[in-house]
């Protein structure tokens, strides 16, 4: 069985941190407003606690829930 956990090596964490920082900067230029829940999720991804696929699925689920609650 293959381990699908994210690479937690220092090099991989550094690479993900740089990529997430660049994405955050682009999003801010486009009008992104700080969202502490999203930022915590990104940090979990950067640290290798969750994979990018898991982060995406959690984000989609969060916004689907918001959409249902707002009715």
Image: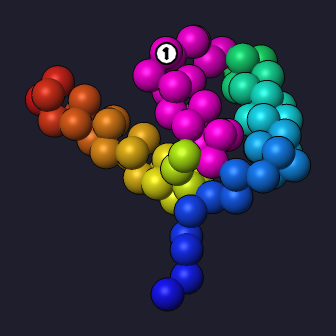
**Rendered location of residue 64, percent (x, y):** 27, 41
Count all numbered tags in the image, as a single digit.
Answer: 1
Q: Of helix, strand and loop, which mostly describes the magenta segment? A: helix
Per the image, the residue denoted by label 1 is 36
- Compared with 55, 28 (above or below) is above
Q: Is residue 19 visible?
A: no
Q: Residue at x 49, y 15 (%)?
A: 36
* Magenta stretch holds residue 58: no
Tell me, what colour scheme is on the image? rainbow
Residue visible at 70% across and 58% down in the picture: 7
Tell which residue pokes out farthest to the bottom in this image: 1
Q: Relative to residue 50, is residue 28 depicted above or below?
A: above
Can residue 41 be seen at all in this image of the molecule? yes
Nearer to me, 30 or 24: 24
Residue 47, magenta (yes or no): yes
Q: Residues within 10 Å of mark 1 (few under 14, many from 20)?
A: few
- Give, as a single range, the part of the protein colored magenta: 31-48
User: In the rendered image of this protein, does residue 40 appear above or below residue 3?
Assistant: above
Q: Is residue 66 left or right of residue 56?
A: left
With 62 as the anchor, is 28 left or right in this view?
right
2 is higher (above) or lower (below) than 31 = below
Residue drawn 55% across and 46% down? 49
Among the 4 quarters of the image, the one containing residue 26: top right
Quarter that holds the C terminus: top left
**Residue 22: x, y in percent?**
83, 32
Q: Residue at x 78, y 35 (%)?
A: 17
* Image position, residue 43 (x, y; %): 61, 31
When asked about the image quadrant of residue 28, the answer is top right
């Amino acid at each position: 069985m293959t381990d699908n956990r994210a690479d937690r090596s220092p090099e991989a964490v550094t690479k993900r941190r740089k990529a997430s920082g660049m994405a955050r900067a682009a999003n801010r230029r486009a009008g992104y407003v700080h969202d502490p829940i999203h930022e915590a999720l990104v940090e979990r991804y950067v640290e290798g606690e969750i994979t990018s696929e898991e982060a995406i699925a959690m984000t989609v689920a969060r916004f689907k829930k918001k959409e249902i609650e707002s009715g």
